[in-house]
Amino acid sequence: MKYARLLMMIPLFLFACKKDRVEQGQVQPIKAAENLLASQFQHLRIEPMEPVFLGLSKISMKEAMDARKLGALIHLRDSSWAAFGKSAFYESDEMTVTPANTSFIYPGSILKAASIATDELLPFVGYQGAPIDLYLSFPSSLSFGTVASPSLSKSRIFLRNALMAPDFSGKQIDDFSQSISFFSRYQEVKLAYGYNVNERRLFASTNSSFDYNSSATQYSTKLMASYTVKNFTFTTPDPTVGQLIDMASITPEVFNGVSPVYINSVTYGRFGLLVVETNNGGSQMKSAFEKVVKKIFKQTTESFTQEEKTLFTSCRVTIYILGSTMGESAIQLLINPNPEGITSFLSDNVGVFTSQDPGVPISFRAKYLKDNSPFKTVFKLDFPY
């Protein structure tokens, strides 16, 4: 796996480069709605995206519904079958970062919408960037301002300036969430990531059986747990004419009639996903694993019983984390692990938000250039009765 360079390693000499000019502590006045950049792209169409289909034949409806509620997905509608079941539709507008797409994740990044739907992020080329406004959600006199054009390097410089301001205040978090649920197929990992992530590419380097159908594996019980610690958000507002794209640099056919999306919000913090596979009883294993998650976040001081420790001696755990002490991302496969070891490892990687350790990009949101509407992924879940 390739690891992205740490935020702290951005060379300071970039400050001297004129094209990377960053103006912080000041921002342009709010302009009228008719001056929005979207008014120049009304002719573009929004490409329809097929729902991501997940058949949940081996998971109870109640368990799935509870997991979705905790996973911050929005329920759209249900569609009953003629007999034996129904389909439920959910949507998400927040997508988790993966190692393969970190270089594209910054405010103002313009991407082909269809590339997000296939987890093969493709940036648009053939245009010149224009200034954008940036905002950070933590207290700092340099938490708002303007950069000459969107780029990963300029975003990192802007962030670093705000973190190093004398009046910076950290240690608080914007949000925290966690969930634990049973699953039957590895593709259900997509729900934790909020879009059609390629879970096989993400995990295959350590877990060779991570494929689209896990029914043939030797484990009868499968649990998935995820946690998200949001430290702050890094956003750009809806661009106005003269921002984001230099209109003089593009031709009418540059987007081929299809609206791209631009990243308008990036969340920094920590994200963890744990996949547990075992032949032990489901209720016992879930109870023991819930204790693991609680101990990670110091929500309990209760020790593991000998019975709980024994449960972990016949299972395997795949761990994926964003924002670890080993780099921006890390993945491990543990066979018959000690639950205390899992707890200690993950607890050490949760971290505390400081100027020296602000977290890493863990999720992002995007909007269509055509009308500033949010990009969303729709999931179709089939529930047999």
Image: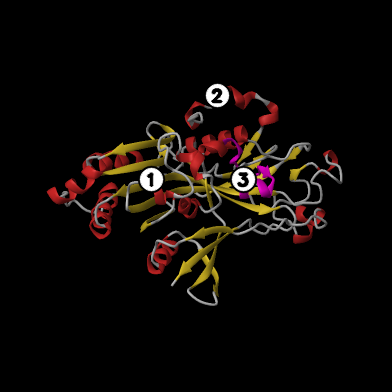
Residue corresponding to mark 3 = 134
Q: Is residue 51 above or below residue 128?
A: below
Q: Residue at x 61, y 35 (%)?
A: 152
Report the amino acid beneath label 2: Pro
Where is residue 250? Give x, y as percent: 83, 41
Note whether 49 is above or below 205 in the view shown.
below
Mark sitting on residue 171? 1
Q: How crowded is the residue under tag 2: few (<14 C-alpha within 10 Å), some, or many (20+)?
A: few
Task: Give amino acid for label 3.
Answer: Leu
Residue at position x 13%, y 48% in the image: 306
Badge 3, how many Cα within 10 Å: few under 14, some, many 20+? many
Q: Secondary structure at mark 3?
A: strand
Quadrant of residue 379 in the image?
bottom right
Cβ atoms at labels 2 and 1 below 8 Å apart: no
Residue bearing the label numbered 2:
11
Give percent across and percent down for residue 362: 49, 44
Sequence-wise first label, 3 or 1: 3
Q: Which residues are magenta?
A: 103-119
Dot 1 falls on a residue whose secondary structure is loop
Provide residue 322's location: percent of width, then percent of height.
44, 40
The residue lying toward the viewer, choosing from 293 and 146, is 293
Q: Is residue 351 visible?
A: no
In the visual, does 251 lie left or right of 331?
right
Q: Residues within 10 Å of mark 1 (few under 14, many from 20)?
A: few
- Sequence-first tag of 3 and 2: 2
| First-in-chain label (2 vs 1) | 2
Is residue 263 visible to the viewer in this orientation of the structure? yes
Looking at the rendered structure, the kind of residue marked 1 is Lys
Whether the magenta-drawn stretch holds residue 333 is answered as no
Given the current orientation, which residue lies at the most extreme left position?
306
The residues tagged by marks 3 and 2 sit, at their Cα atoms, a distance apart of 21 Å
